[in-house]
Image (spheres, grey):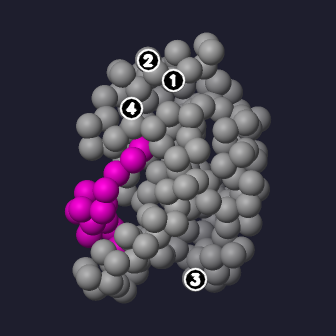
Amino acid sequence: MLVYLIGFMGSGKSTAGKKLANKLGFEFIDLDHLIEQETDLSISEYFEKFGEEKFRELEGKVLHKTSLLDKAVISTGGGTPCFFDNMDTINKNGVSVYLKTDIPLIMSRLKGEKNQRPLIQNKTDEELRTYLSDLLAVREKYYEQAHIVVVAKSLNINDLADRITLFAKE
């Protein structure tokens, strides 16, 4: 079984993914780290060198490769479900979990990480709030296609593991 965690940047996919993988006895995989291993570049460097379009193409290819795995929790990038047929791939190959969050929580989590995130570098706080609100509004329709939706702020890993197990048995 594969579990794909989706959601906006800063929603806690990597943090929750590690805990969930441990709880389920699965391997934890961060899709961005797979991309970095494949390219020998950080995500920021890849964006800078090749642009977002090439990044999204590579991201889709790496995502498709995860379907060959077994017993893994995969943390996707915030935009992964929103391009090409990625959301269909995610839902076809595993249990998708949307970690739903709001702009104030995202803002508080991203303040110290702006330099590592190519889409938000060099934005003032007000520009960042507007950008995040607009981007979340666009991406929400993809995220809402997940099998399971949980509020990231009140996430309980034990409850989520139980929900995933029940969903997988259906």
Q: Main secondary structure of the magenta part?
A: helix
Between the C-alphas of marks 3 and 4, the distance is 32 Å
Q: Nearer the viewer, mark 3 or mark 1?
A: 1
Is 61 contained in the magenta span?
Answer: no
> What is the crowding at mark 2: few (fewer than 14 residues within 10 Å), some, or many (at least 20)?
few
Q: Which mark is residue 162?
A: 2
Q: Is residue 140 above or below residue 165?
A: below
- Do labels 1 and 2 touch, CB within 8 Å? yes
- Where's residue 144, x and y in %? 52, 47
> Residue 152 sits in which quadrant?
top left
- Where's residue 165, x and y in %? 52, 17
Q: Is residue 144 above or below residue 165?
A: below
> What is the crowding at mark 1: few (fewer than 14 residues within 10 Å), some, or many (at least 20)?
some
Q: Which residues are magenta?
A: 99-115
Q: In terms of depth relative to the viewer, which is nearer, 3 or 168?
A: 168
Q: Residue at x 35, y 73 (%)?
A: 114
Q: In terms of depth relative to the viewer, which is nearer, 6 or 146?
A: 146
> What is the crowding at mark 4: few (fewer than 14 residues within 10 Å), some, or many (at least 20)?
some
Please indicate, yes or no, whether residue 91 appears anywhere in the rendered image. Answer: yes
Q: Residue at x 46, y 70 (%)?
A: 135
Three-letter amino acid code of the residue under disc 2: Asp
**Left or right, residue 92 beside residue 123:** right
Between the C-alphas of marks 4 and 1, the distance is 14 Å
Q: Residue at x 36, y 86 (%)?
A: 122
